[in-house]
Image (cartoon, helix red, strand yellow):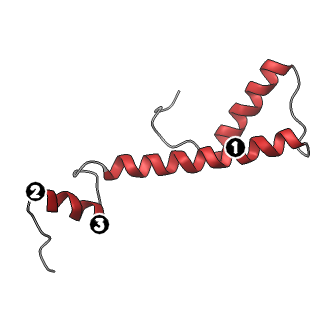
């Protein structure tokens, strides 16, 4: 298994969910069916959430933060960015 904290792609999540559904139910959802559409929507939302959590995790610490988030870390320590 890859890094459990790495963002998961839509395709990875959808594959995992359809495989899990098939393992439990014994059949796979039809691509035009209501259940498959719901799984697609859920996979998209989860993928988006993974990306947002990854971004938040990177901006949480000064050594990985960038831009405005790095400026905010500096402000908490009484530092300001030097002019170019």
Q: Which of pointers 1 and 2 lies earlier in the amino acid sequence?
A: 1
Q: Secondary structure at mark 2?
A: loop
Q: State yes or no: discs 2 and 3 in contact (Cβ < 8 Å).
A: no
| Towards the viewer: 37 or 31 | 37
* 59 up-or-down from 12: above or below: below
Q: How much space separates mark 1 and mark 2, taking CA atoms?
A: 41 Å
Residue at the spot of label 1: 42
Disc on the earlier residue, 1 or 3: 1
Image location of residue 73, percent across then percent down: 20, 57
Residue 77: give its label.
2
> Residue at the spot x=78%, y=43% of the render?
38
* Left or right of 63, for residue 31: right
Question: Which residue in the structure is indicated by mark 3?
Answer: 68
For this rendering, which residue is in front, 50 or 1? 50
83 left or right, relative to 67? left
Query: Which residue appears farthest toward the bottom when viewing the image?
Result: 84
Q: What count of labels does the image hold?
A: 3
Question: Mark on residue 75?
Answer: none
Q: CA distance from mark 1 to mark 3?
A: 31 Å
Residue 27, by quadrant, is top right
> Which of the two labelled residues, at mark 2 and mark 3, occupies the earlier sequence position?
3
Question: Is 66 in front, or is 41?
Answer: 41
In this view, 57 is above or below 71: above
The quarter of the picture where the C terminus appears is bottom left
Kind of element beneath mark 1? helix
Q: CA distance from mark 2 to mark 3?
A: 15 Å
Query: Which residue shows up at 9% across the image and 64% down it?
Result: 79
**Whole-percent x, y for residue 14 in the image:** 71, 39
Q: Is the Cβ of the residue at disc 1 closer than 8 Å to that at disc 2? A: no
> Which residue does the image show at 22% across and 50% down from the upper left?
63
């Amino acid at each position: 298994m890859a890094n459990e904290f790495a963002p998961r792609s839509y395709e990875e999540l959808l594959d995992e969910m359809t495989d899990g559904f098939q393992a439990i139910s014994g059949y796979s959802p039809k691509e035009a069916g209501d259940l498959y559409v719901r799984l697609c929507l859920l996979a998209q939302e989860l993928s988006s959430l993974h990306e947002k959590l990854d971004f938040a995790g990177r901006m949480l610490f000064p050594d990985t933060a960038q831009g405005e988030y790095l400026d905010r870390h500096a402000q908490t320590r009484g530092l300001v960015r030097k002019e170019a």
